[in-house]
Amino acid sequence: MSQLAAFHEVRFPAPVAFGATGGPRRRTEVIALGSGHEARNTRFADSMRHYDAATGVRTLDQLHAVIAFFEERRGRLHGFRYRDPVDCKSCPPSQSPTAFDQPIGTGTGAATTFRLAKSYGSGPTAYVRPIAKPVAGTLLVAVAGVVKPAAAFSLDPTTGIVTFAPGHVPANGAAVTAGYWFDVPVRFDTDEIRVDLDHFAAGFIDPIPLVEIRA
């Protein structure tokens, strides 16, 4: 029986993720011109994370857990959350999030919703990444440099939308900033997991690719 694709709000096994490899990938076309110069063009405005979960599998029990997770997601069909140990906070990995980490908008006096985002770099060349899968209970928010109480806002952890409560709507021109933990929305990029116990005993396992999706 066929199924429609869905996103499952569950996280890939953390012990495996912490040993996995991967990171952001971009697609840039480079054309060599007859003059010796180059013409470069990016095909996508946003980078896309790719990971190989196989490098994080250390035991047969972990492999069994990954296979169970794969089967429950029906291979490539359903998306899920992935914790990237290098990039899972609004701040560097060694620090704790604060309400001043990331700008997420400017108040108008009427706007009540703001989308979480994370900036890489600074100035006009900074890359602003939408954050769609924040971790519930981790969000800190400040307006015009003043930390807001938890009752002043709510968060939809499935979309990354912050909504301010009546009486707490940011004033016109007020900077809105936030700090948080987040996951990456991904799916398996294969419909097959190949297991060879002889290779596994020797420290080798076929790739288990994961790819970021726009959730």
Image (cartoon, grey):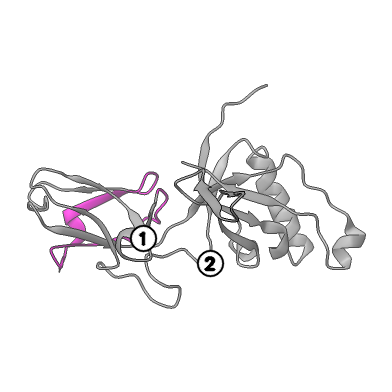
Question: Viewer-nearest of labels 2 and 1?
Answer: 1
- Viewer-side residue, 116 vs 31: 31
Q: Residue at x 16, y 55 (%)?
A: 152
In terms of secondary structure, where does tag 1 sit? loop
Asked if residue 123 lies left or right of residue 76, the reply is left
Q: Residue at x 11, y 57 (%)?
A: 174
- On the image, the x and y values in percent for residue 29 come to 57, 47
Tag 1 residue: 126
Q: Which mark is residue 85?
A: 2
| Amino acid marked by disc 2 | Pro
Magenta segment: 132-160
Asked if residue 88 lies left or right of residue 65, the reply is left
Q: Residue furthest front?
A: 35
Label 1 environment density (alpha carbons within 10 Å; few <14, some 14–19, many ≥20)? few
- Viewer-side residue, 61 vs 11: 11
| Amino acid marked by disc 1 | Ala
On the image, which quarter does residue 135 sit in? bottom left
